[in-house]
Image (cartoon, helix red, strand yellow):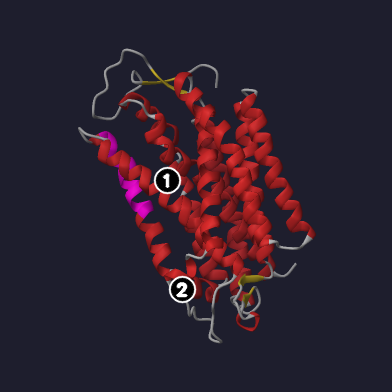
Amino acid sequence: MELTTVWFVLIAVLWTGYFVLEGFDFGVGILLPFLGGDEAERRVIVKTIGPVWDGNEVWLLVAGGATFAAFPEWYATLFSGFYLPLFLILLALIVRGVALEYRNKSDSTRGWDRAFFWGSLGPAFLWGVAFANIVRGVPLDADHEFTGNLLTLLNPFALLGGAVTLTLFTLHGAIFLALRTTGELREGAVRIARTLAPVTMLVMIAFLVTLDGGKPVWWATVVLAGAGLAAALVATLRGRDGWAFTASALAVVAFTAALFTGLWPNVLPALDPAHSLTVTNAASSPYTLTVMTWVAAIFTPVVLAYQAWTYWVFRRRLTGAPGVPVGPPNPGPSALTPANGG
C-alpha cells in the first residue's frame, strides 16, 4: 500500500475518532438546557464529560496536524477556502472550553451554560456543513484556489449535512447521558434518544442517498450506519445502555467512513474534475511521509492507551445526591457521588 493511501486512511481514522468522542461531548452540551432542570442536575450533566472533553479535542489537533504534514496542498486550500466556517468552529470551541472551565468558579452559571450550549451546537452543525462541501466538491481554479464565497458553502446539500451531524451528535450525547447517569436524568435522556433516533436515521439516509458514492464499499458503510442507528434505538428501548452507546458509536464510525470512502481518491474534489485535489497531487514528499509513518507507529499506541485508561477510570455512572445544597465552587464527592451499577 502506498504511503499516500496510508495517510489518507489514518486521517480518516483520526476524524472518525474525533466525531465519535467529541460527538457525544457536543450532544451533552446541546442537551444541557433541556435536561438540566436545576443546578444540581446541570452539574451532573457537565460532570459526565468533565474528565474527558479536553482529551477528546486532541483528535482534532492531530487530524489537522496530520493533514498539514501529509497533504499540505489540501490543508492550504481547505483552510483558505473554508476560512470563515473554520474560524467560527474554532471560536465556538474556545467559548465552550472557557465555559466548562469557569462555570463552577462563578456565583451564576447561567451565562456559562448558554456558552456551553452554543459552543456545542455551532460545531455540531458546521462540521457537517464543511464535510458535505468537501465530499460534494467546491469551485477550484487551476492553482487549486477556492473561487467561491460563504454562500457557495451554504448550499442545500451542505445544510442537510449539517442537519445530519447535529442530530447524530445530539442522539449520541443523549445515549451517552443515559449510560452515565441515573434516575430522572437517565429517563429524560432515554426519552430524547427514543424520539431523536428515527429522525436522525431519516436525515442521514436522505443525505447519503443524495451523496451517492456509488462504490460497493460505500454502500456497505451506508447500510452499517443505518443498522447502527436501528440497533441503538432497539437497545435504548430495552434499557441496554452500554449496547445502545456502542451501536450509536458504530453509526458515527460508519457515517464518517461513508464520507471518506465517497471522497477517495480525491481529498478535495473540484466542480471541474481537472482541478481536483487528489491523494497524489496534494501529498508531501515520500521522505516526509516515511518519517511521519514511523513517528505515528511509535506514539499512536501510547496515546490510545492513555485515553483508554482515562475512560476506564471515569467509567461509573453519576448521580446527584438528594438534599445536598448546591454552592458555586467546585462540587466535592458529597454533591456528586458515583452510583454502584457502573
Is residue 76 in the magenta section? no
* Foreground of the two, 310 or 98: 98
Q: Is residue 157 above or below residue 221?
A: below
User: Which quarter of the image is occupied by the N terminus?
Assistant: bottom right
Point out residue 190 in the picture as x, y percentages from the top left corner.
54, 27
Task: Name the spot of residue 113 as percent of width and height, x first.
Answer: 32, 39
Magenta residues span 92-104
> Which residue sits at x=65%, y=66%?
263
Tell me where residue 319 sits by quadrant. Answer: top left
**Residue highlighted by disc 2:** 81
- Residue visible at 62% across and 63% down in the picture: 294
Marks 2 and 1, how far apart in space?
A: 27 Å
Q: Is residue 64 left or right of residue 216?
A: left
Q: Amino acid under label 2?
A: Gly
**Is 121 placed left or right of 240 in the picture?**
left
Asked whether the viewer can see residue 51, the reply is no
Magenta stretch containing residue 98, yes or no? yes
**Residue at the extreme top of the image, as rendered:** 323
Question: Could you tell me residue 152's position as x and y percent?
Answer: 48, 71
Q: Is residue 116 left or right of residue 307?
A: left
What secondary structure is found at the residue carrying circle 1?
Answer: helix
The residue sitting at the left extreme is 107
Q: Position of residue 7 (x, y in %)?
A: 63, 65
Q: Earlier in the sequence, mark 2 or mark 1?
A: 1
Res 107 → quadrant: top left
Secondary structure, mark 2, is helix
